[in-house]
Amino acid sequence: MSEYIDFKTLDEAAKAEYAKIQGKTLSPKDRMAIPQQIMPTGEPKERARQMTEVALGYTKEQAIVEANRCLQCKNQPCVSGCPVNVPIPQFIAEVAKGEFKKAVDIIKTANLLPAICGRVCPQEKQCQGQCTVGKTYKDAEKAVSIGRLERFVADFERNNNLQTVPQVAASTGKKVAVIGSGPAGLTVAADVRRAGHDVTVFEAFHKSGGVMVYGIPEFRLPKAIVAKEIDMLKKMGVEFRTNFLVGRTGTLLQLLKEHGYDAAFIGTGAGLPKFMNIEGENLIGVFSANEYLTRANLMKAYDTEKACTPLYEAKHVVVVGGGNVAMDAARMGYRLGAEKVDIVYRRTRNEMPARREEVAHAEEEGVNFRFLENPVKINGDENGRVKSVTVLSYELGEPDASGRRSPVAIEGSEHDIECDAVIVALGNGSNPLMVKTTPGLNADNKGHITVNDKAMTSIDGVWAGGDIVLGAATVILAMGEGRKAARGINEYLAKK
């Protein structure tokens, strides 16, 4: 279990380091000697029963100290590791000087959602994974905390009411339909609107924000922050139409031909949950992580007095999977009243795809990890409710095609875990609705819409990006695909 350090201790240490560097010209050696600033978090036992945000964000002193760890490399390897190419050294240089508004303005030249990305992006695998400081330490976790600094300046801007509406070009008279209001869709909406085109975003749910609203829990990404970013797009002139399921309420071709849209972008994500196809998955108390988290996040099932959806009460929850969604579901289990939560994963900790920070937070809150186990059957009682799950034990064999060592079942190792709820968090596939209702729209054998190098689909004037193209990915990767598509749309409409 990771060590919890209280806010007061972190604050005092940061102020001491801040005093040391004030007014000094720092050499690279001096910068390397500055200790990395740890993100303050809520006390584990308390926060595990609350929906409030776990990570509390840097203080001003912490942000300035951490920014001074940056070596300002001329080759800027961190930028090449960012899917949207944020000018990272430049914004960090402003943080180091205490110029927080200038810093966030630099970020927004490439990324209009810094408060979101600073919270949920896997920086350790992207920008921070390329950081020279981390490579010098031979430990990516010792890299400059780029994501935490991004979050800090975005929060500073919002909390001090310093946000400014991005400039929009003169109207072109062209109309663009954006299908899906997740990170890819919002990025396209912003970039296309800035070029002067009219933009309407169509969202199937009653709230905009896509996976950032229904998938990522409040304790990791407060929904008020997502709403604030969407309000900014509305101020830019982007129109949002909720409760509009393209493919049912109206088809994509109807939008183009009957409603006069000159171009469209499909950013519907990967929302079709995968199951294990084992006996007992239809029992009462078995949920996909999608449903479990959507009920809690979008429909606020935890607020039993006001929620419009029922809360399934469970005392012992078993979550199957090892990614970030599995961590979210497990931690949500405690917040929905569970007394014990287990994560069952068929490999070891080293192979888990979840962010280390999320794994650490889950452990701090009491989640129990059962490695090298995998369910083979879910058992029910006489009322058809989950009473246990039968799992096999595994050992690691040779690496598979992805480089991870393949799990090999140990014959005769079956054993039961008593529980009253099972959450399946094994990833998502693509919902086939868009392809099935749009003649001429091509997809691969996994249901991912196929696009060219400019993100255009097989239909002229229609682009796609995000998880519907990549498969289940990350917020920032979806945004990167959105930026590529927006460039293609703007070029297309300029010629048209």
Image (cartoon, helix red, strand yellow):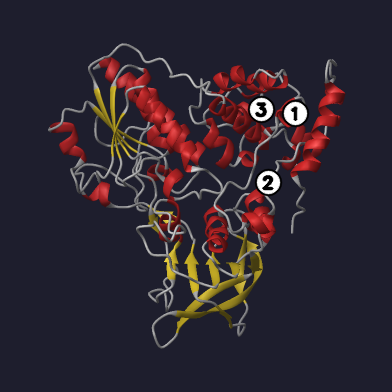
Tally the marks: 3
Looking at the image, is 91 positioned above or below residue 43?
above
Numbered tag placed on residue 77 in the rendering: 3
Q: Quadrant of the C terminus?
A: top left
- The x and y percentages for residue 375 are 53, 74
Whether tag 1 and tag 2 are in contact, CB under 8 A, the answer is no
The residue most toward the front is 305
Determine the image quadrant of residue 8.
top right
Please say whether residue 262 is visible from this viewpoint: yes
Callout 1: SS: helix
Which amino acid is tagged 3?
Pro
Mark 2 surroundings: few (<14), some (14-19) or many (≥20) residues within 10 A: some
- Left or right: residue 94 versus residue 383 is right
Name the residue tied to disc 1.
Answer: 61
Looking at marks 1 and 3 on the same chain, the residue that comes earlier in the sequence is marked by 1
Q: Residue at x 47, y 57 (%)?
A: 427
Numbered tag placed on residue 41 in the rendering: 2
Q: Nearer the viewer, residue 350 or 201?
A: 201
Which amino acid is tagged 1?
Glu
Q: Residue at x 59, y 19 (%)?
A: 101
Callout 2: SS: loop
